[in-house]
Amino acid sequence: MELPSVSRFHPRLLDDLRGYTRDRLVKDIAAGLTVGVVALPLAMAFAIASGLPPQAGLWTAIVAGFVVAAFGGTSVQIGGPAGAFIVIVYGIVERHGVGGLLISTLCAGVLLFVMGLLRLGVMVRFVPVSVVNGFTNGIAVLIALSQLRDALGLQVDRMPADFFGILHAVGGALTSINPYAVALASLCVLGLVVWPRIWAVDSAFRRRLDALEGVSALRATSRLPAPAVALVTLTILAWALKWPVDTIGSRFGGIPQGWPALVWPDVSWQTVRQLVIPTLTIAVLGAIESLLCARVADQLRGGRKHDPNQELMAQGITNALVPFIGGMPATGTIARTVTNIRSGATSGIAGIVHAITLAMIVLLAAPLARHVPLAVLAGILLFVAWNMGEWREFIRLRHYSHHYRLTLLATFAVTVVFDLTLAVELGLILAVVLFVRRQSSLFRVERVAGTEGVLEARLYGSLFFGSVTKLDPLMQAVDVADTGVHVRLDARYLLLLDTTGLDALAGLHDAIVRRGGTLSIDHLHEQPLSLMQRTGFLSRLSAWSSLTPPA
């Protein structure tokens, strides 16, 4: 018999293929080809920035793209290496080596699958937006800083993983700036900004342009993905002019042409214990990023919502597989998913076509990648970092509460200066503590006029462990009241009661009884009433009433 708490494995693709038409197939193929070209430079750039060879990112994009599209809970999500993982992966490789990264990714994949199986996908939505914006902006800053070596052409053997280490390394190598690298990175960023807008002119001017011979065909090229255009054109420029800049070939010896060699991670219990924190970091960040991406896809497409548990299971399968081809952690990628949607994707077939497109490029054109300048890939990542950050949140902070500001800024600062794992932990703790503080401040006890010998009060808000001290004035009033006083509490505005709050009410009841008095509670809501019934507290009251029937 199936346990009710276990999720059913049902990929969204099975539903998408019902009534699948030729029209949809053409749209999916076109979208898949487009997003495959977009993914090519990003996959290489993410791997290199993470301290891995470019083929690690490419084959991760291929495997993740196929698995997420085939088994995920979203119709149009594109899986692959993501910018959010750069800082994490680089740190793990620095501390534990590539072997440690493979084991952490494998264990994170198992954990993600179990999270989806146990229907914990909805729990990821409980992470406050202030925490998400804080660590996302922090990661964006670290990505940008980590690319300064290649963007400026600095002579630094290996970039440190920490914030102050990066600043020290970059500052100490500023005398070795390569103007050719700076030119390539600057042209890349400029091209990524300008290319999509270069033909975005008003309709009257557009018609006059189209009337000119050849201009209409040239304008059609603006539909090509900007990262791919920047990669190809600037690589040709640097190669033709023989600019002295570092390339994929000079640093990594090129990209092997052919299928990846199978790798068997050296898994042992002792190693797994040492990698608990990296594993949890990859799993939590992967879950947050993939489900945030799925929510963005839902908003852009409308219609049927994603299945968060199925999506986590697909992400789990992906991350459990990529270590065996020497890959890196993967998740849902917002930029490529948005490109997929805007290119007309209707189902997971587009994601599968994207994976096949990448595989064909790697298998047929891998030797050409050795000429790609690292400064160009650094320019692409600088652009990614800028788009990744929610920079407007800093400007809008003045419109939010002090609690929101403190949580976002603390998470951001700790992410940049210390560590993402610590930042998320601190952010969640701060969010919980500040939420408790806020809820406790909303609870109040209001004395109301009563008849002689009767002490009446009205309860507002939530009576829980953070607000029980608000009952102290009422307890003091009971202590100085006449013997035999009757206390009547109006609970029509009492929305929530926990066991600590109930214990405080029991203490109030005992104090009243010791003075020969009685306690009654009126107009109870369902949740407080249910708790009082289950614990037997109602039977101790002299009278009670409810706004709803007993549960």
Image (tube, rainbow, N blue to C red):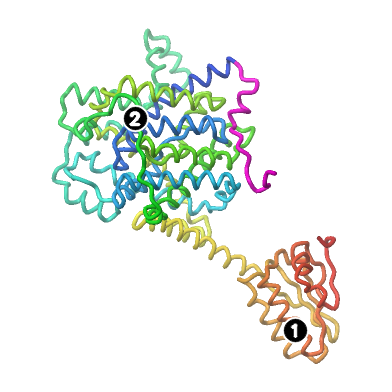
- Is the residue 230 above or below the residue 385 in the image? above
The type of residue carrying mark 1 is Asp
Identify the residue under disc 2: 260
Q: Nearer the viewer, residue 391 or 496?
A: 496
- Residue drawn at 45 percent across, 34 percent down: 64
Q: Percent position (x, y) of residue 426?
A: 45, 61
- Is the residue 432 above or below the residue 301 in the image? below
Q: Residue 384 sits in which quadrant? A: top left
Q: Percent position (x, y) of residue 251?
A: 21, 35
- Residue drawn at 79 percent across, 86 percent down: 513
- Residue drawn at 22 percent across, 23 percent down: 237
Mark nearer the N terminus (1 vs 2)? 2
Q: Is residue 273 highlighted in magenta? A: no
Disc 2 secondary structure class:
loop
The furthest residue to the left = 175
Q: Percent position (x, y) of residue 72?
A: 54, 35
Is the C terminus in the top left, top right, bottom left or bottom right quadrant?
A: bottom right
The type of residue carrying mark 2 is Pro
Q: Residue 34 sits in which quadrant? A: top left
Identify the residue under disc 1: 510
Gap in Å between the C-alphas at discs 1 and 2? Answer: 73 Å
Q: Is residue 2 highlighted in magenta? A: yes
**In the image, is 183 to the left or to the right of 135?**
left
Disc 1 secondary structure class:
helix
- Residue drawn at 29 percent across, 24 percent down: 257
Q: Which residues are magenta?
A: 1-21
Which secondary structure class fits the magenta region best? loop
Q: Nearer the viewer, residue 284 or 227?
A: 284
